Image: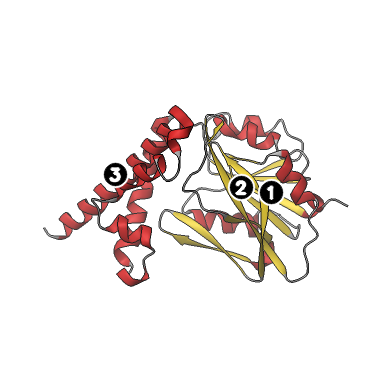
Amino acid sequence: MSFLQQISVLILTYNEAPNIGRTLDALKSFPEVVLLDSGSTDDTLAIAAGYINVRVCCRQFDSHSAQWQYGLTACGIEKKWVLALDADYQLPPQLVDEIGALSPSSSQSGFYISFRYCVFGKPLTATLYPPLIALYKRHNANYIQEGHTQRVVVTGEIGRLTGLICHDDRKQLSRWLAAQAGYAVLEAKLLRSSSWQDLKLQDKIRRLIFIAPWLVPLYCLTVGRGFMDGRAGLFYAMQRAVAESILAIQLLETELRGNQ
């Protein structure tokens, strides 16, 4: 029996009409896909209704960690394993086949999966997106909030898959900019509340304020070989420049207000 039969896919959605159809198309081999929606007003739910393996739950959004935890515990998921995906994550057929062929030992509780970042369907040579534990045993998982996003803590042995998830967000730029502004508030709070010695190198660079907005896009174009990806690589580098600049401005504003 395919291991897919032991997995429920959990996806958080809010106005994801530009993405959700492509994501669900790649999940037709999974017996159950649960969409936890935060009150979409676009065609997200109408698109989801066209897939027989999809059911929808709704909850008002408060934080990413609380939303994911609600999905695990209050949406009727009974299968032992969960594949947790954002609405703009697409699984290539090779990755679906790899997951279907898994036969985890009793000590294994999860798997890291790496990403291939795409810009309007064009895969980039390299990005800053780290691997995540996206497939895990439901009862071994717990979500915690870290800055603007969440992290799943899974007890037990964690393996790693070779296939890549395609991250391909095609929402409007205005949505992306609004999201970055909200993320920056949470990320700045985390950076300022953490001791210097506990920060990772990239977060130390961010807390210096004036370095990350130019260093990160330069890294993406050179070390990350974004120059090989043409306009798509330039688009990604400029996105990172804007995101780091918004965070730097938020950190600086917080510092200045604290001096009033």
Amino acid marked by disc 2: Leu
185 left or right, relative to 169: left
Amino acid marked by disc 3: Trp
Q: CA distance from mark 2 to mark 1?
A: 7 Å
Q: Are marks 2 and 1 in contact (CB under 8 Å)?
A: yes
Q: Earlier in the sequence, mark 2 or mark 1?
A: 1
Q: Residues within 10 Å of mark 1 (few under 14, many from 20)?
A: many
Amino acid marked by disc 1: Val
Residue drawn at (68%, 36%) of the image: 24
Q: Earlier in the sequence, mark 1 or mark 3?
A: 1
Q: CA distance from mark 1 to mark 3?
A: 38 Å
Helix or strand or loop: what does disc 2 sit on?
A: strand
Answer whether residue 10 is visible to the viewer in this image: yes
Answer whether residue 195 is visible to the viewer in this image: no
Residue named by callout 1: 9
Residue drawn at (64%, 30%) of the image: 47
Residue named by callout 3: 214
Residue named by callout 2: 85
Q: Position of residue 240 (x, y in %)?
A: 38, 42
